[in-house]
Image: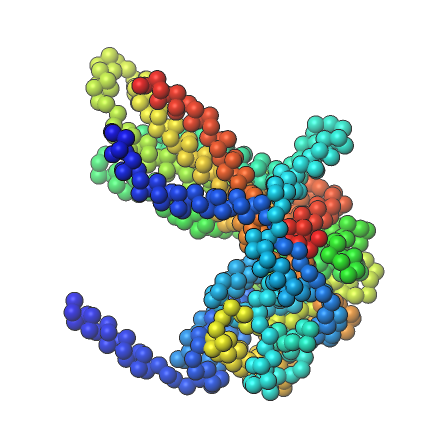
Amino acid sequence: MKKLLIALLFTFVSTSAYAGGHSPCGVTDGSIKILANEFTTYRIFMDEVKSCAGPSADFSVTHSVDHNKLQVAALSANPAEFSAKLVTNGSITTLMNDNLIRPLDDLVAKYGSALQDNQKIVIDGKIYAIAFMANAQHLWYRESILNDLGIAVPSTYEEVIAAAEKIKASGKMANPYAGAFKSGWNLGQEFVNMYLGHGGDFFKAGTAEVSVNNAKGVAALNMLKRLTEVSNPDFLTQDTNAVKEEWESGNVALMHIWNSGAASLLDDEGDQAIKADTRLAPSPSVGGGSKPATTLWWDGFGIATNTSDENAEASFRALLGAATSTEMANANPNATIWLIDGYSPGDTAGPVVDAANRGATPYPSLPYMSLLHGALSTELVEFLQGNESAEKALADVEAAYVAKATEQGFL
Amino acid sequence: MPHRTFFWFFFPSGLAMLLFIGLPIISSFFQSLHIEPEQILMEVEKCDPFGCKTETKVDIEATTKLQEEQPLGRFNGLGTYGDRNHLAFDEIKEAWTNSSSIAEFTDILLNLPFYKALLFTLTFCFAVTPPVVVLGFIVALSVNTITKSLKGPTIFGVILPMIVTPLIGSLVLFWMIDAKGILGSFIQFLFDDPNLSLKSSSQLTWITLIIYGIWHNTPFAFVVFYAALQTVPQDPIEAAIIDGASRYERVRHIVIPHLYPVATFIILICLMDNFRVLEPIIGFAAEGVAQSLSWMIYNDLRSENKMLFGSAGATSMLTIIGVAILLTPVLIRTWREFRTER
């Protein structure tokens, strides 16, 4: 027993003596704890952050698809559970509302010379986040299947449905379309895309008063309904990762998911025949509109307010190292569209650039948008199951939003 | 037991209950009476990779100041209890005056989040508890009769559903009932319908959740019944055998009356447990079609915005009241039995 103790102690001492290895980003003290979403591109990014922090750094990262639900609670605590959070234009507003991320101007002035100007997220004159990638949802299709049936690549959602119905009729696939319709955030996002594609506005200008129960909202819902009719009947349980699995199993010929999905769909794992047949296309427009029915996103990082300055600095330097790493970007050109200086885009960047050129709107960064998104997440299900009219579903969305916004003090 | 002894015997657990159950309930109640302070908005310029534009943002300084003045938030009385996401008094009143038939009124009522959740919660409670009691009893009787050498492994096998964490258990079943999973494709084969999916309709999802609930809860009933079976007096059973009573008659007239109080206890615990159903809903990704009261609390505290403490507190209070109402008949019955025994 005594020997065991000595042995244990010895291991402990020797590891700590060994610690103090080299950190490429100059991280010396402070711990780095990061909360992030879970998908392949983030994993690539985090590997770079980790190697930049160096082997001796106190480094940990939590990948979770529920990151948005965890962030407020985790960063409100003081000291916060995480020193940094990967944010998007969707999730940053919630953190800004509660002052949970800190201005980065000092740190940027000290270390950020390699940053490009468009990487800096400036709100009211202060830098609150550093962006490193751009993302959008767009159409993906199986070339051989469309060719076999003589279908042109759809450029509108009406054509997507016609194509899906043709594939279904041919007997090649029972449910040729897929989208992330999982009840919750994903379903809300599908409505946001489709409603913006119809040219809708979520709020009365300049106020927190919601207005989605209108002709555009009804048209958007009806289009979603028609899409779900050519989707797997389990659509309400499928998030983006589940849709990607369907795609890799060869069950789907058309889908509308994230550009960053390329990192796992076009890698060397899985059925290579399907990979070779996978093509990316611009996001379709809808209802005769010119704008694609999708939203533009940036992904970046913010540093927690409720963490020590040492932790903040260590986290910032490690994350910045990855967010300015031209090598990482060019080694993974198809993982996403990096905003990093010196990056030459791969062949998958097209649809996102196209969406931006055709006037797709960035996801609205309004303080009360997440409340509306939450209401959309739960109140649209009954309509998609055919138990409720579109007008009723939208009226429910508005009522649920009003109740929550009142409690939060926005109305 | 003298009252004094009882007091000291009960004191430690009483204190723990007060600290860890009583106080949190009081604090939830106070929180449920408040809503967040007003959010002060301002227009600022925002620049990101897609360009600069003027957008609305929360004025952090002003809002923080308000928050410091009122750390609990604005006092709202019972307002949160009556809003649309809870008891929805206004909506019900309106529905009552505007609907032409009871069916239409029920439709509107069950479309309100709280009543929708209440309907599922009660359905789950009352669909799961009776089969659990019956099945648990049958399993306990069967296990009691098998030979000693097989008893250990059998008991382990029977209580396995209880050992598996609810979330993991439901996730495993969720994948098994997938259209391509072993159970899902078997059901498709059985009904000869390649498009049948247990996850796609609300009725089938409810049935799946209920079956899962029975599967998960039966071991609890089994354990309690099995323990109680060991206390069944042997004399009347032997006498009954001599009198020529069949096995069914012995169970019906000796074992069941003996286990009656135990059954009441199991029903009590099962109702209470099932009223708080949450994990299977998450595990089966059934949030869309099946929401329980606990899920509403979870959703308020884990939505993407600031946690809605007031709303969650109000739902918690209503859940406690619900449990109390549900248990009253059983408690009254136990009290009466207790009185007559004395």
Give left or right: position of A4 versus B95: left
From where the camera sits, is residue B48 visible? no
Image spot of residue A327 (x, y percent): 55, 84
| Figure check: A339 above or below B73 | below
Q: Residue at x 41, y 38 (%)?
A: B217
Q: Residue at x 23, y 18 (%)?
A: B236
Q: Residue at x 76, y 32 (%)?
A: B98
Give left or right: position of A82 versus A290: left
Give left or right: position of B101 versus A52: right
Residue lying at the far right in this picture: please name it.
A288
Image spot of residue B212 (x, y percent): 47, 41
| Figure check: A328 above or below A361 | below
Q: Residue at x 50, y 79 (%)?
A: A313
- Of A37 and B97, nearer the camera is B97
Q: How many marks?
A: 0
Image spot of residue A338 (x, y percent): 62, 78
From where the camera sits, is residue B273 visible? yes
